[in-house]
């Protein structure tokens, strides 16, 4: 069957091609893709930062939702017609991380949509173990945000946020806002630090306390809010050196710092502050199956509303314009590509 696919072809360009859909093999599932979001990693690809890894003819995309269209041999527990999302991690099963039960950070991990072709195509064939079934009544546009929400759920779980704890989220972009939502759901008292006034306004509209480090010393704000204690949990989501400086300055004694952002260059970290206050640093890379299940449950139960996060929706033929707009619009939260108009409402 011929389908439409959007290939990243290098130098900030995409080619819309007609290709033959790959049928599912043993242990695989084919999905009619409804929506696929553009994430920060996709933007790194678009800007040429990952050409050495993915080349210049790759279908990217992984923040998706869709409907199962075909099953390969030996696939059980799934059925054609089920609405689903994909947890885009394919592990090797035999490296030290996999043997220890940490398949999500497998030493030989393949990230679907980067190391393999991804979801900016009308039919996407993936390993069955990556598929999570959705309730029938969950809007597929909202479901496309389950992947980034699962990132946030994993971050908050790594940070062990407990009811009543003071939480600082450094960076108010899409992941930062989702981390703040998940931390608030866990019972944290959340403050978001962000320099973009429009994103601060958006965060305030969601009911969050905010601070702009261009206008005030955020560490002092945290100390004033907590009688000098500092933040019990800090999430560094900005990917900037000032954000790294703030994470140590604002952390409480024996506070936990969760490194969420990917830094383009190696940051300098105040290790003296780690020693002085016995701060704990935690890495948070992607997600595990339970994070996906929690993200789905939060959406189904209405605990977190991601609808406000969707800034705009573009057809797959407009993918180049969508990426271009995101690079020039720092105020956007989440842009979706409507991949398959037949199932995307």
Image (spheres, grey):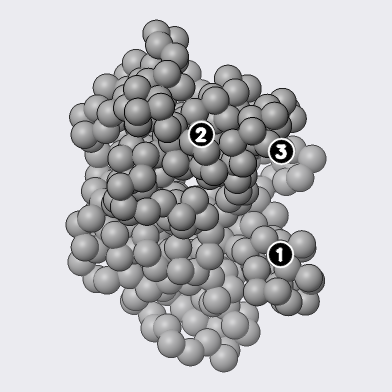
- Residue 279, image x and y in percent? 59, 41
> Helix, strand, or loop for circle 2?
strand
Q: Quadrant of residue 102?
A: bottom right
Residue drawn 35% across and 28% down?
227
Q: Evaluate whether residue 341 shows in this view.
A: no
Say above or below: 298 vs 25.
Answer: above
Q: Dot 3 surroundings within 10 Å: few (below 14), some, or many (20 or more)?
A: some
* Mark 1–mark 3 distance (CA, rounded to whole Å): 20 Å
Query: Sequence-wise, which precedes: disc 1 or disc 3?
Result: 3
Between marks 1 and 2 in the image, the one whose residue lies nearer the viewer:
2
Q: Which mark is residue 251?
A: 2
Q: CA distance from mark 3 to mark 2?
A: 33 Å
Callout 1 touching callout 3 (CB < 8 Å): no
Q: Residue 306 location in percent, x, y?
A: 28, 46
3D distance between C-alphas at marks 1 and 2: 30 Å
State left or right for residue 295 relative to residue 147: left
Residue to which mark 3 is pinned: 50
| Mark 3 or mark 2, earlier in chain | 3
For disc 2, the neighbor class at 10 Å (few under 14, some 14 to 19, many from 20) is: many
Q: Which residue is mark 1?
A: 106
Q: Considering the image in quadrants, where does the C terminus appear?
A: bottom left
Tag shown at residue 228? none
Name the residue furthest top: 215
Relative horizontal placement of residue 263, taking residue 78 as reference (left or right)? right
């Amino acid at each position: 069957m011929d389908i439409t696919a959007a290939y990243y072809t290098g130098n900030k360009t995409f080619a819309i091609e007609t290709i033959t859909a790959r049928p599912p093999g043993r242990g695989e599932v084919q999905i009619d893709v409804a929506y696929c979001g553009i994430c920060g990693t996709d933007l790194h690809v678009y800007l040429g930062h990952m050409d050495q890894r993915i080349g210049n003819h790759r279908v990217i995309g992984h923040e998706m939702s869709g409907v199962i269209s075909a099953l390969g041999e030996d696939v059980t527990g799934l059925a054609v017609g089920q609405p689903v999302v994909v947890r885009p991690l394919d592990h090797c099963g035999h490296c030290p991380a996999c043997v220890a039960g940490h398949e999500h950070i497998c030493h030989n991990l393949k990230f679907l949509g980067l190391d393999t072709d991804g979801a900016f195509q009308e039919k996407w064939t993936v390993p069955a173990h990556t598929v999570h079934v959705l309730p029938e009544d969950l809007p597929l546009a909202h479901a496309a945000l389950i992947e980034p929400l699962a990132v946030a759920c994993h971050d908050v779980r790594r940070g062990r946020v407990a009811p009543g704890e003071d939480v600082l989220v450094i960076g108010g972009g899409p992941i930062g806002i989702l981390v703040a939502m998940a931390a608030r759901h866990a019972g944290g008292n959340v403050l978001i630090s962000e320099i973009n006034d429009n994103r601060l306004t958006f965060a305030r509209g969601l009911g969050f306390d905010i601070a702009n480090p261009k206008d005030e010393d955020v560490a002092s704000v945290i100390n004033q809010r907590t009688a000098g204690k500092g933040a019990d949990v800090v999430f560094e989501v900005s990917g900037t050196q000032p954000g790294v400086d703030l994470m140590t300055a604002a952390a409480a004694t024996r506070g936990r710092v969760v490194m969420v952002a990917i830094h383009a260059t190696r940051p300098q970290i105040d290790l003296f502050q780690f020693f002085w206050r016995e701060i704990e640093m935690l890495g948070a890379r992607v997600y595990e199956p339970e994070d996906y299940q929690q993200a789905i449950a939060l959406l189904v139960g209405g605990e977190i509303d991601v609808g406000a996060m969707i800034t705009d929706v573009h057809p797959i033929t407009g993918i180049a314009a969508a990426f271009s707009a995101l690079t020039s619009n720092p105020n956007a939260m989440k842009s979706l590509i409507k991949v398959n108009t037949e199932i995307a409402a």
